[in-house]
Structures are given as C-alpha cells and as structure tokens.
Amino acid sequence: MDSLLQAVMMLRELEQDSQTPKNAKLKIGGTIKLLESSNGKMDVSKALNELESLSDDVNIPSHMRTQLFSVVSLLEIV
C-alpha cells in the first residue's frame, strides 16, 4: 500500500476517535485535506510540520501521540 494513502487512513482513524480533542480533530482534518490534494513534497512537508506541532500539544493523549509519530514516519518515506 502507498505510504501516503496509509498515512491518510491512519489520520482518518485518529480524526474519528472519540478521545481526540476538538482542536486536534481540526488540525488532523486540515492535514488530511492537504495530503489528499498533495502536489508534491512541499505539501508533505507542510503536513509533517503540522503533525509535529500537534504531537507537541500537551492535550494530546499519549496513545494518540504514538500514532502521530507512526504517521510522521510514513510521511518521511514519501
């Protein structure tokens, strides 16, 4: 499976998780849109920056932070 597609699927799971804070859902939704309309490495870099800033948020549960790191790892391959 394509790394980009797999990353989007993982982000959708996080977005739909009931334990995900609202502000994180908004950022994840924006990141999904960015990746789906991706025109190259610049959009992937923007998505990576967004996810890394989200993982630094103190309101993010630790299990979600781990999933975000997995998504970041997938996107670094792209």
Image (tube, rainbow, N blue to C red):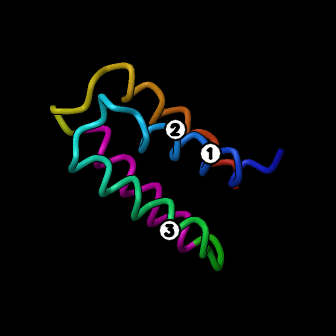
Considering only vertical position in the picture, is 40 above or below 59? Answer: below
Residue 7: x, y in percent? 62, 46
Q: Earlier in the sequence, mark 1 or mark 3?
A: 1
Considering only vertical position in the picture, is 46 above or below 71? Answer: below
Q: Earlier in the sequence, mark 3 or mark 2?
A: 2
Residue 63 painted magenta: no
Spatial distance from mark 1 to mark 2, Cα to Cα?
6 Å
Instruction: Say left or right for 74 vs 67.
Output: right
Residue 32: x, y in percent? 50, 60
Residue 53 painted magenta: yes
Q: Which residue is denoted by mark 2 in the rendering?
A: 13
Single out the residue that lies furthest toward the top: 63
For the residues bearing labels 1 and 2, Cβ distance under 8 angstroms:
yes
Q: Which residue is denoted by mark 1 in the rendering?
A: 9
Residue 34: x, y in percent? 50, 70
Instruction: Say left or right for 78 vs 33.
Output: right
At label 1, the amino acid type is Met
Residue 36: x, y in percent? 61, 68
Residue at disc 2, secondary structure: helix
At label 2, the amino acid type is Glu
Which span of residues is magenta-colored?
Answer: 42-56
Q: Which is the main secondary structure of the residues drawn in magenta?
A: helix
Tag 3: Cα neighbours inside 10 Å, few (<14), some, or many (≥20)?
A: few
Single out the residue that lies furthest toward the right: 1
Question: Which quarter shows the C terminus?
Answer: bottom right
At label 3, the amino acid type is Lys
Q: Residue at x 29, y 49 (%)?
A: 53
Q: Which residue is denoted by mark 3 in the rendering?
A: 33
